Amino acid sequence: MKRYRNGEIWDFEHEKIAVGGAFIRENSIFNVNKMNHSGRKVILGIDGGTTSTVCVCMPLIPFTQPLPDPLPVLARAVAGCSNHNSVGESAARDTLEQVMADALIKSASTRSAVQAVCLSVAGVDHPTDQDRILNWLREIFPSHVRLFVQNDAVAALASGTMGKLHGCVLIASTGTIAYGFTEDGREARAAGAGPILGDWGSGYGIAAQALTAVIRAHDGRGPQTSLTLGILHKLNLSSPDELIGWTYADPSWARIAALVPVVVSSAEAGDLVANKILHDAVQELSSSVKAVVQRLDLCGEDGKDYFPLVMVGGVLEANKRWDIGNEVMNCISKDFPGVRPIRPKVEHI
Amino acid sequence: MKRYRNGEIWDFEHEKIAVGGAFIRENSIFNVNKMNHSGRKVILGIDGGTTSTVCVCMPLIPFTQPLPDPLPVLARAVAGCSNHNSVGESAARDTLEQVMADALIKSASTRSAVQAVCLSVAGVDHPTDQDRILNWLREIFPSHVRLFVQNDAVAALASGTMGKLHGCVLIASTGTIAYGFTEDGREARAAGAGPILGDWGSGYGIAAQALTAVIRAHDGRGPQTSLTLGILHKLNLSSPDELIGWTYADPSWARIAALVPVVVSSAEAGDLVANKILHDAVQELSSSVKAVVQRLDLCGEDGKDYFPLVMVGGVLEANKRWDIGNEVMNCISKDFPGVRPIRPKVEHI
């Protein structure tokens, strides 16, 4: 696919009919001709992650109207990684521009129809990250367009609260982060700093602990564990020594996090080492949520106020006997009995 | 500098006088002419690491003669990383060939003078690593040349025991490994598997724990610590949030391990978090040595036999009040009173 450099992608708007152009997808030529001048106002919502980025284009719905169910999605576009920490600033911007342009073309709209952009993207860790993205978004969209830039955890929270930014969200997939909002607009986060900076409850963290346990059992520093056979079998290796070359060959976090099901299986079969790893992960994940709840006082003065906790990500999915998400809930509700878990139904791409 | 692909570098031996060639260094043309036909037999010793690689060329000294002191080094050549895990097989081989050819040219020798090659190189973690290197060394040197390929920890042990492979060596710099040999030729290792696989007593491990402690103090998961000010000051950052971008910008382990002195200073000033990190590192490093000693039975049946423990690497250097190496020794000697520490004087390049 042709790569567009920052800003170039919007040239499609000046082409009369971009037949054969990179962005013309099924039926869109017809739509472009029919709808481009309809004057329909739209909003763009982007969920930008390290694995993939999704943009949906929706019609603007006035506040006075109830939200339709299901929501009227005009178009949906998918692209790759938009976390600047992983691919660099320029490539992340390219991806975000690409996915927005794609969604607009698919919905037969142009930038002039856009009234608001809500960009929830991994790697927004500091106000300067937000400012940098807002600056280049402002180059693309005129000043009347409302722009919102947030960490992707915010989209995850909204997915469980039907858009209301109140409560806490815990994400645990390859990485992990806890993010919280109060009704008066304060926010706080914990973890989400990457594996070097100690996100130990993440899928990567769980799997790295399991790999470490295999090495320690092998060299005499730790107890024997059924993780050894489970992991070697899964990776088609014959000796723990070979794990060294395996990890060096491709240090991608997602590749390591993919071993979590082996850890869960070993724990379910009674392996003490695997059980300890999962219990430690539960403590880590719970401590992230507790830190956010305490800083924002989400639980009220008596510690018993109701607040929603949206739980998303493969590590927390309730499809196993050893249910990590459930254990995290139990741990949190001991301190904060008002916690109300929400496991949103989200699309898998 | 011109890059030579695997095997090409030895072409210099067919050139009559390689004036202006890439490998002719100061005075070597004269030496080549004078000495090339002297028939002097030499050996090559290579210490190959992730940061740098050193090759020395020495005259072959018959077993019947005592080793001269100082050892008669004919030439010494330095190159970059030769750990295949870091740079790949081909680049690692290039570097090793380059440094050997360099040392031979500097000592006015050629391959035909070489009687033995001892290659101690980081990343030799499995018999297949050894076999792969032996195979290409055998393409370069004829069958009468004795070839030895070992993990670089073996060179470190020999540096403390004047060449005798008996006892244990503990390396703790950016990474860490413990390696042991018995007098009857058995060997064992512990750790040395890299940061993903839990080398927590390493310089990288200590610094990563410190960075994690700063993030946890910042987001409410952990206690406040003077590491925050110390590390932010050292890195010229203004907020712990900025550490996320800092670690992503360049995940080199050595860059992170360079923060160890900040941790030691904080611990010396009484910071509880920093002290716990160093005490944990002492336990980790000690457990590596203990695992090797037990597997090889280095301490004899009553656990009190004498054995040498060679300690090398910046983490173990005895130049601080909080002396990690000394604490490791204390911890090991509680279980194995026969341990005798050796801190060899090694060249710093």
Image (cartoon, coloured by chain):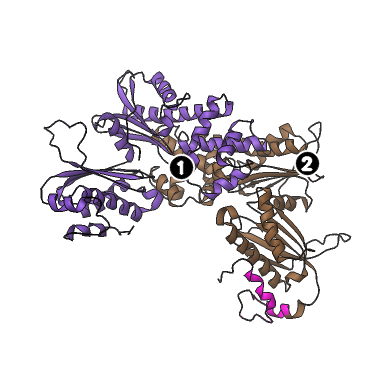
Chain colours: A purple, B brown
**Quadrant in the picture for the C terminus of chain B:** bottom right
Amino acid type of the residue tagged 1 in the rendering: Ala
Front-lying residue, B325 or B305:
B305
- Looking at the image, residue B57 sits to the left or right of residue B197; the answer is right
Residue B307, labelled with which disc?
2
Residue B65 to residue A329: above or below: below
Q: In the rendered structure, does residue B25 fall within the stretch colored magenta?
A: yes
Residue A190, visible in the rendered structure: yes
Residue B349 in view: no
Instruction: Please tell me which residue is depicted at 24% across the width and 54% down the height of the picture.
Output: A24
* Magenta-tinted stretch: B7-32
Marks 2 & 1 on one chain: no
Label 2 is found on which chain of the structure?
A: B
For this view, does B286 lie left or right of residue A303?
Answer: right
- The image quadrant that residue B9 belongs to is bottom right
Task: Tell me the residue that label 1 is attached to.
Answer: A254
Q: Position of residue A342 (x, y in %)?
A: 33, 26
Tell which of A325 and B106 is nearer to you.
Answer: A325
Name which residue lies at 82% across and 44% down. Answer: B184
Chain ID at mark 1: A
Percent x, y of residue B218: 40, 36
Please give left or right for residue A258 compared with residue B292 in the image.
left
Residue shown at the point (76%, 34%) measured from the top left: B337
Q: Is residue A67 left or right of residue B313?
A: left
Residue B68 image-quadrant placement: bottom right
**Helix, strand, or loop for circle 1?**
helix
In the picture, the quarter occupied by the N terminus of chain B is bottom right
Q: Which mark is residue A236?
A: none
Q: Measure the C-alpha gap from mark 2 to mark 1.
A: 44 Å
Q: How many marks?
A: 2
* Percent x, y of residue B61: 83, 63
